[in-house]
Each structure stands twice: as C-alpha cells, then as structure tokens.
Amino acid sequence: MKEIILNTGATMPLVGLGTWKIAPLDAGAVVSSALLHAGYRHIDCAAVYRNEKEIGGTFRKVFSEGRVKREEVFITSKLWNTEHAKKDVLAACKLTLENLKLDHLDLYLMHWGLATVPDDTLPIKNARGELLDENGCLRTAPVSVQETWEAMEQLVKAGLVRAIGLANFTVPMIVDLLSYAKIPPAVNQIELHPYNQQRALVEFCQSKKIVVTGYSPLGTSGTLKDRPEEPILINEPKIAVVAKARSKSPAQILIRWAVQRNTVVIPKSLSPEHLKSNVNVFDFELSPQDMADIATLERGHRFVNPSKWWKIPYFD
C-alpha cells in the first residue's frame, strides 16, 4: 500500500518530501528532483519555512510543462501561529496559494495549537524572531482554537483547500476540537520516530479516523553545533542490524517502520540519491520481530520541543 485514505475520501501518499529547513536557494531544485526523478507525489510545505515562493516556481514549471499533472501531487501547507485570528486565516491561505502558484491545497494544517502576536515593534525576541514577554515566554494572542478552526472550515467551503487538519496537537486538544468541529480534522502531523513513538496519540487519532503524519522521522543528523548532546537516530545499532539484514539503508528502515505503523512519513533530503532511496520502501517488509526490536528504542525524546525556545511546556 502506497497511499492512505483520508476521512474526506481523498488519497494521500504514505511517503512525501518534507521541506522544513531546506534553504530557499535549494528548495526549487530539490522539489523538482523529487517530482521528476525520484517519483514523489506528496510535498509538505509551510509558510513559516520561508521557501514557498521557490517551491511555487518549481510547481508552475513542472505542471505547466505537463511532465507531472497537478492532480497527481498531494500538496500540504500550514497556517502559522501569528495568523490564527478569523480575519487573518483567509489572507494567509491566499498568500500561500499565491506563493506556491496553486489554486488549491490538498491539505491545510494549523501548525501549532496556540496563537501568537504578530511581529511588531516590541523589542524582546528569541533567536527565532518570535516575540517574548517580560518573563522570556512566548507572547500568545487571545485567539481560541475554535475561532481558528471555524475559519479553516470556511476555506474548505470556498474551495481553496480540499482538507484541513492539525499539527502538533495533543489528545486533550483534539478532544476539545472535536466537540465543535463541523468538519473533522483529516490529519494530525506530529514528531514520530523510534525515540518518540507516541503510541497512545497515534492510536487515538487513528480511532477517530484522523491520519497521522510523522515529521523528523530520521531524527537529527547530530551536526547541530548548538545541540551536540542530541542522539543520532540514524546511527542507532539496532537500526543498523535490521538494515544490514534487509540490505537497506538505516533511513529506509526508519521510513518503512513508519509506514508499517500505518502513518504517513515526510523525510527531508537534499541529495538526489537519498531522495530516491527514501521513497523506495515498498519492496520489502519489516518482520514482527524487527518491529518489536525497534519499539524498544522508545525514550520519549523530542528533537522538536518548543519548551526550549518558547518557555512554554507545550507537550507536558
């Protein structure tokens, strides 16, 4: 199975290309390589990644030339925290569509479950450029998730997006949203890998017919100068053992692990070789023992933990 069916009836490829941390100068070429040479039909974007204009240039060129048809590619983007107010959601979506050179998105996600104040002249900011209060915590805005979700539902009715969903939502947040949602979320995109398996959250989402997409599936490269203490998942010995037995790369084992959990996965790569190998995970299966061995790697470790830069214990 290479696709999964959303609660809208649409299909979503199980493996896509993540574009987080792809520099704008590289983004267009990487997406072009993924679509034209590696066979990707799922591209995951976000306004806050600051590379949608470059990706949009590639979409316009590839689709206009007819080498890949627009309807063959599942394209996701995300609403950033500063645009949660009802008056801002439509404009934010239209700007993303303009940048991506599209007339609709297949999926539009709330990037996080909290609203923040837009950038202004307030002087206190963190290293990410986000506004902080006098205590060094992220400056949140008084906008409810319900207000934002109702505005997201209007995007579906307007035909600008085919499906709407969530990212980084916890079970209590989803339960609350389901109490008023007229259009239920199709997807919840969360950090997933063997070090952070989130089994209960995955099972809950799947029980509610919410497809789970896993980001950071390969962990971190371990080359981040500001975080030398991070574990390097791709070098994990248990993964290496399974990879050798299957004559596959460690990355392919991690991606296949995600697919066999019935979750979508969006690995990132700038390498044409790795782009091809990352999507080539449907010619083998991991055994129940392989899955059990990988499951023992759970350590509750997040590579993306906003409590470090927002000073808000979001996941606690």
Image (tube, rainbow, N blue to C red):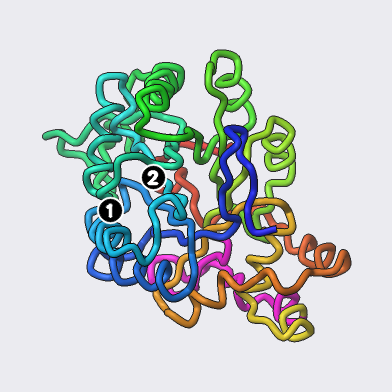
Percent of width and height locating residue 17 = 46, 61
Callout 1 amino acid = Glu
Residue 173 shown left or right of residue 198 in the figure: left
User: For this rendering, which residue is in front, 240 or 135?
Assistant: 240
Magenta residues, start to end:
217-241
Residue 161 shown left or right of residue 13 in the figure: left
Q: Which residue is mark 2?
A: 77
Q: Secondary structure at mark 2?
A: strand
Percent of width and height locating residue 223 = 44, 75
User: For this rendering, which residue is in front, 115 or 301?
Assistant: 115
Q: Residue at x 57, y 54 (%)?
A: 13
Residue 116: name its quadrant.
Answer: top left
Q: Which mark is residue 207?
A: none
Q: Which mark is residue 52?
A: 1
Callout 2 amino acid = Ser
Callout 2 touching callout 1 (CB < 8 Å): yes
Q: Residue at x 32, y 53 (%)?
A: 49
Of callouts 2 and 1, the N-terminal one:
1
Q: Residue at x 49, y 52 (%)?
A: 304
